[in-house]
Structures are given as structure tokens and as C-alpha cells.
Image (spheres, rainbow, N blue to C red):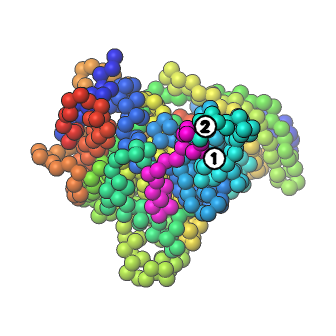
Amino acid sequence: MISENTITDFIYREAELLDTMQWQAWLDLFHPDARYWMPLEWQQQDPVLQPSLMYEDLLLMKVRVERLTGERTFSQKPKSRCHHLLQAPRIVACDPAAGIFKARTSYIYTETRGDTLERFSGWASHDLVQVGDDLKIMLKRIDLVNFDAPFGNIQLFM
Amino acid sequence: MAKYGKNPRAIAGLVRDAEVHRDVYVDPEVFELEMEHLFPNSWIYVGHASQLSKPGDFITAKIGRQPVMASRHSDGSIHVFYNRCPHKGVKIASEPCGNTGKFFRCPYHAWSFKTDGSLLAIPLKKGYEGTGFTDTQANGGLSKIKNVVIYRDFIFARLSENGVGFEDYFGESLSTIDNMADRSPEGKLAVAATPIRYMHTCNWKMLVENQTDTCHPMVAHESSAGTAIKVWQREQGNSTETPMAVQLYGPFMSPYEFYEQSGIRIWPNGHGHTGVANSIHSNYSDVEGYLGQMVAAYGEKRAHEILGEVRHNTVYFPNIMVKGAVQILRNFIPIAVDRTLVESWVYRLVGAPDKLYERALMYNRFINAPTSIVGHDDLEMYERAQEGLKSNGNQWVNLRRLYESGEEPDVTAVINGTSERQMRNQFHAWAKYMTMDMNQDMDQPVEAAE
């Protein structure tokens, strides 16, 4: 039975996989029809007809992950590393009967490469579904507090 | 140490026939002179008239480092002025866009201005009586930029009072903007959202040059476009329809031969475009209903003419690039010698199916966003160049690919698509627009850069 604790543990585990660069295990957390979305507007509703920083399906996320380790991926020489500092997730919905599990997590994200270090703040929203005994991500939405600022490269995943 | 100020000969000396000196990318003094001469002497993109749809609408922008704003006046006319109060210099508008109502009001001392920039009122006006105020520039309100041309809703301004006229400056290159607007069944484009913004730690000209650099995609983007193709081939299974994403990434891996035959067209004053015969945008799938709309609007022949023109990147010297086939404009805004803000705008084709806007937005975030893997490939190259150019081992950047001795400057020509001639064309224009207003400062007249 999926409880609020299951959701929280899932979100901590996801961040740990990213921070330890276990990319394949991280991709395995996603449902085949999942989306990873980084809006470009305040309280954005439409990912298709409004601009976003990212709105990607599993195919595109696989491309990203595979690219990170490519022999000719020069922007990963040296490699980037990341760190997620998460606030305790706020459970928005935990309804096993309806199959609805949602959480919102405030975070500080650090991405570093060579001598540079960039820090970002925002909220991650997880829409999860139950597949067998496991939870899978249907939608991971990243709302940066300064979504409209001009960033340099963001090469890993928040 | 000032080497280049008031020294047009030294500036012209930075540009050889097929080489440029590294100081054009790394020397802070050269950058200062670009802000002082090159940008004011050139026609610079300010914004799009669709961003000013109602009276009182305004947008802000920068020309070089100078803040400017454009507004829609109550009579429907568009005005461009310097974004500074004539009183103490406070910026009148601080947001990228907005609506000011019937007038602008300076937040410091409440001087107010009509939306055509003229002075409306000053509190305690009596205090200025008999002071000679009416003879000052402040009495004229917001300082207006006189040389403004709105072409197919694209607002361009030239700060220098004297210089090359708009028509002479852009000439036939305007055909790319025409083609982009003509792709709307109503002949109209509209800005419907904010641009994607991406900060680059490199000189702005590296970005401009890269727009017509057709020998880098299959090399630098092997990691992104090449991986996209590889993953799709592995994952596609029985799928017969190539996803829009793979259609957009895939052509970046086209071989040299493709770019060679697709050609480059150059125009006078540093403008030029890749993708003459065809381009990486040629083979996107049709969008249902669109061709019918175009034929209804333009007739069979003209509709096919418009849609058959699929230019790749058009550089409008000095610092924008337009992609008509996916309705994108990239603005390379110089911040410092080694810092460039890239704002990538998408225009909606008025009256066309949503799917085209969806594709343009997708292209923009795939290629032009700080989260774009193609962007990561490019920025890595620019950053390495910005560092590498500090080396004294070789102070020249080589632009000699397919150079022919005696190349005429400021001509229109179609050439092999892997030529670096458009880069040479840009640097010829660079030297010209850097120095054209310097000679008058000299004791001894010298030859112009060309």
C-alpha cells in the first residue's frame, strides 16, 4: 500500500540517483509516457503552445543521458556534477484508490563543472502513478524561482 | 593602454582579407569602441510591432549598451526613444514590456511624457519659469531616435544621425524577413511569448559567425544530434513516423556535401544566409491544412514559391539572425567583451495552424535554450575559443576557407555552402561600420577601412 512515506522516500531516492549519476536507474523511475517539464512562465499551464526550457519525453531524456557519457561530448570534458538539497516534500495527493499521488518539493540545486558552480532554487512537482508495486513518474515539473533569467548551461537534471 | 581609440587605421588593420586579429574578440577597448561606433552606426533590431498592439504599450531594449524604448502612441504611431528621463537620467521603463496608459511618468520626480515622448507636465512647473528651461534639451521630453524604420512590423533603429539609410543598409537581405512574414496566410507575424534567454561567456561575434559556419554541425553536434539519431534508430521499433524532435535534430548531422550544394548567399554590408538551394529545414513533415490556407491566400504558384524558400540562417549584420522556416529571431546582445546575452524569439504565423507554432517553440528550446544539448555543444566551443585566443602563439583567426584572391567586398553572390566568405563579409562590414564616423576626428584624413 502506497503511503505518504512511500512518496517521500521515492523523491529522496530520485535525488540520490541524480546526485550519484546513476542515470539508467534514474530513467527507470519514469513511466514510458512520462514528461520532464521546465516551464518558462509563471504558473504556466500549457507546455506545448507556450515556451518552455524543457518539455521532454523518455526518448529525449535517453538522448540526454546517453550524450552525457559520449566520447565526443566536449561540454562534458570535464564532467558536470550535481547536488540536490531538498526540503521535506509536501504531499499534495495520496489516494491509492484513485491512483493519484502528487507532491511538491522545494529545493536548492547545485551544478558544478570544472571551476564553475551554479546554484538554482525552485520547486519540483511530482505526478506519480502506481505500476505493480512501484511508483513511476508521469510528470516531473521544475519551476525555477527565476525562470525568466538568462542562465548559462544547465546540463544535468534538477 | 589605448591602442585603437580614434585610430581607424589600427582598427582596419585588425581585419585582413581572410584573417582577423584576436583583439576583435578579446580586447576590452575594441569592445568599447564597438559600443561607441559600430552599434550606433548600424541598424539594430529593437522589437516587433505586435508587441505594441495597443496605445500605451511599450518595450525596452538596448542598442549597444544604451537603453532605449519603443511605444505605441494614441494615434497608432510607433516611437523609439532613449530610455532615460531628461531630468536626472532615471530609466523611465524598467520592465521588458508593459502598458503605461496615456502617459509615461518618471518614478523619481513625476515628470510625465506623452506616449510619443514629448513632455507633458512637470510638478511645480513655475519653478522653471524664467530659468531658460525651454531652451534645454529636457524641454523636448524623452530624447527621440530619429532614424527608425518599421519593416513588416520589425522595428529597426540607427542611433547615429548620419549614416547609411535603411534600404541601402539591408537591401535584398530583407527578402528573408519577407519570406518569414509571407509564411502566414495573412502575411503577419505575432510575438506571443517571452524569448528564451541564454547567457554566453564569449564575445558576441563568435555567435554571429557560427550562424553561417556549416563545417561545425557534423563535428561539434555529433554529441547531441548524432546521439539523437542513434537513440531513435535503436528505440523506434515498428514506428513509421519520425517524431518531430528527431526531424529537428537529425539534419544537423548532414554531411559536408549537403552543405556544399545548399550554398551561401552574401549581400553587401555584412548580411548573408546559408541554405540557398535547400536547407536543414527542408524536409519537415507537412502540417495538415496549412498548404490549403496558403494556396487560398496567395494562389497555387505563389504559395509554393513562399514555402519552397527554406533558407537556413540569415545574418542581419551586426547582431541578429533570422530563421524564416521556423519563425525564429536570435538577438546576440553584447554585454561585455566576453559576455553575450542571447534572446531567441519565436513568432507566431497569424492565421496558420497551431502545429507550426508548436514546432517553432520546440525548435527554439531544442537549439537555443540554456537547457539545450545543441546549445551546450556550441557554447563549449565559444568558451574554449575565448580562452584559447589569449594565447600569444598565434594572434590571428583564420577565415580562409574557399577564399579567392581579389574577392570584391559588398557584393551579392551565391557561393559554395562551406565557404567562410560570409564571415569575411561580416568582418569587412565590421571594419567599415567601426570606422565610418572616426575619420572626422582625425587631424589627417585616412582612407576608409575598405
Determine crowd level at label 1: few under 14, some 14-19, many 20+ residues with C-alpha closer than 10 A. Answer: some
Q: Residue at x 49, y 47 (%)?
A: B145
Q: Of marks 2 and 1, which one's residue comes earlier in the chain?
A: 1
Residue B107 spot, x, y in % from top left = 71, 38
Res. B358 in view: no
**Which of the pair B102/A98 is nearer the observer?**
B102
**Which of the pair B392/B446 is nearer the observer?**
B446
Residue A29 spot, x, y in % from top left = 67, 43
The residue to which callout 2 is attached is B133
Side of B213 relative to A85 (left or right)? left
**Which of the pair A127/B127 is nearer the observer?**
B127
Q: Residue at x 55, y 57 (%)?
A: B78
Quadrant where the image shows the C terminus of chain A: top right
What chain letter is assigned to the residue under label 1? Answer: B
Side of A44 relative to B244 (left or right)? right
Quadrant where the image shows the N terminus of chain A: top right
Magenta residues span B135-155
Side of A112 relative to B274 (left or right)? right
**Is the Cβ of the residue at disc 2 closer than 8 Å to that at disc 1?**
no
Say which amino acid is labelled 2: Phe
Determine crowd level at label 2: few under 14, some 14-19, many 20+ residues with C-alpha closer than 10 A. Answer: few
The residue to which callout 1 is attached is B119
Question: Does the magenta-highlighted stretch encompass residue B216?
Answer: no
